[in-house]
Amino acid sequence: MSGQRRIAWLASYPRSGNTWTRLLLANFLSAAAEPVGINDIGSAMPNVLFHGRPWFDSLAGISSSDCTEDEAESLRPAIVRFWAQETQRKATPLFCKAHEACRDTPAGEPLFPDDVTVGAVYLIRNPLDVAVSWAFYLGEEGFADSVAYLNARTSCIGGAGSHELRQRLFDWSGHVESWTGAPFPVLTVRYEDLLADTAGWLGRIASFLRLEGASDRQRLEGAVAHSAFARLQENEGREGFHTRSPHSRTPFFRSGVAGDGSRHLSAAQVGDILAAHGATMARFGYSCRATG
Amino acid sequence: MVPAVAAQRVPFTIDADFDLGEAAAPWCRAHGADVVVRRGAVPLSLPRPESRGVAWQHAAGRTLILTPCGARFLVEGGSAMRYALDGGASLADLRLFFLGTALSVLAAQRGLLPLKASAVADAEDVHAFVGLPKRGKSASAAALAARGYPFFADDLLILDPEGLDAEARCYRCDDLKVWPKALELADCEKVGPVRPTSKYRKLYAVPRQRAARVSGRLRTVVYLASFKKGDASGDRHSMHLERLSGSNKVETVIEAAIHSRPITIAVVGRLPLFQWVMALSRRVEMLRLTRPEIPAMFGAGVNRIAALLSAADSGTVQGWASP
């Protein structure tokens, strides 16, 4: 990995396949006979949550809970630069999961600094399916709140009183525009394409990130098999999953399919999402007739 | 109100030119103090730092702390501290970072072990709560104060490693701070904002009971967690309490209980710190409470801890066993 450009952002709006992609990469990098456990991604690759308070506190040396959200956010570019400089492990990029929009800090500096970035893999998923997946994740009775979240320009998650730092998402279209217009190389991957040809897209991701073995078909197929949805569900059923929301009534790895949105959302909810995001959906090949 | 505590022994005394607050009163002396804290010039960096993080540097017995609110501290040789306030930082901001990060660095420079913990008192004993950020440490201590265990410490617990073979003597120095939504859960009363900005929401609060003592014998450390690998019940109301032993105790303290951990490691050194933690883990009971982060489970978790502490008080050894 040349110079200080060591950070590979794995970015997505929430519930768009980020965790699955990290498991695919972890299994690809581990190339082991046994699958990487869903709670053990960090053992297979250098991997952090950009919004994690423990990571922030350990690199800042001060407690994020003593800071305002603006103060903490303004320190985060320096924190990721420090991580890129100080981490001893050399072989692969340093993977950083992020849900927030690609934007500036309150101090006017890019939150995702270009000078330490190898590139970003941006996962995009049909917002109709995102709304449904998010509602199940949060244990909501209906889908109104998650639809409202996707449509509000001020949406954010985490923050004061949460174990995650504040993450400003924008609305779904704003999130997509922010990442696909980022000032560093971005590989945009549709979740639906990743589902349809997992090994092929994993190979493209590995090649984009210049990972060793990116064209090794056997290795790619092995990682895909180790990350099969049924296997992840079995793993979660056996040992639980730390990322699952305590409010959720369903497993974290619930269905993983494409096209859930039109089956669960009301016509009015579908209409709201299409009205707000139709242009961006069309740009990325999503039908604006609610069939995914 | 906290009863008079002026005569109580503390590991060092402080002469500061600003108000440290009521809970820190036992540490304060107007003259002849061990540590003098004054407003003055504080550099933006140290020459040739031996170690550093994003908001701190350490070199030749001096530690520089740069907070994002504009308060800066230079802690020198365990006996002097200078601070500067830039960018609109207030005295309230100064006090918050002084009684947390800066005091923990000062303690480390003086050969003491700063723990990131809240705590309650139980006669001569102290039971502490540690954990990763936002796991309910302060709120749990405050809630236990409404169940017969006087509130003892918030955020920083200073441990004297000298006598660890005999007992784990620890000291407290700050008032209770909680998030607004914890006020009701923890049954405590709002005093006012910790920082004078609407962008910072933590509040000073008064618990139902407060310990008068400034020190106590650390007996129990409860590690608060939200996930236990292997808990696949899918039950959002499942809760686990288990006793830790051996290397699990050491790992837990190092991972989750050292205040300002990277700075403390730089100041104390890895080996001495590890030796202190080993000695501490031999001296105290350690429990891990895993509870879902939902308000409905908070009270049940606190009741579980209270029952366990009560069983231990009464000598019911089974009280310490894993459920």
Image: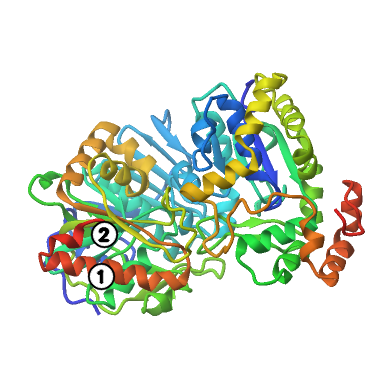
How is this picture coloured? rainbow
| Mark 2 or 1, closer to the camera | 1
Location of mark 1 (residue): B306
Residue type at numbered disc 2: Ala
Pointers 2 and 1 within a single chain: yes
Location of mark 2 (residue): B128
Q: Quadrant of residue B136?
A: bottom left
Q: Dot 2: what SS?
A: strand
Instruction: Give the mark, 2 or 1, whose residue is nearer the N terminus.
Output: 2
In the rendered image, residue B122, in percent from the top left (x then y), is placed at: 17, 68
When the figure is inspected, residue B45 is found, relative to residue B197, above or below; the finding is above
Tell me the quarter of the image containing the N terminus of chain B: bottom left
Residue type at numbered disc 1: Ala
Question: In screen coordinates, is A21 left or right of B172?
Answer: right
Residue drawn at x 23%, y 45% is B245
Circle 2 packing at 10 Å, graded few (<14), some (14-19), many (20+), is many
Q: CA distance from mark 2 to mark 1?
A: 13 Å
Q: Nearer the viewer, residue B264 or B55?
A: B264
Q: Nearer the viewer, residue B60 or B192?
A: B192
Q: Quadrant of residue B17?
A: bottom left
* Chain of the residue where label 2 is placed in the rendered structure: B
Q: Dot 1: what SS?
A: helix
In the rendered image, residue A101, in percent from the top left (x then y), is placed at: 71, 51
Q: Nearer the viewer, residue B104 or A131?
A: A131
In the rendered image, residue B55, in percent from the top left (x then y), is placed at: 47, 44
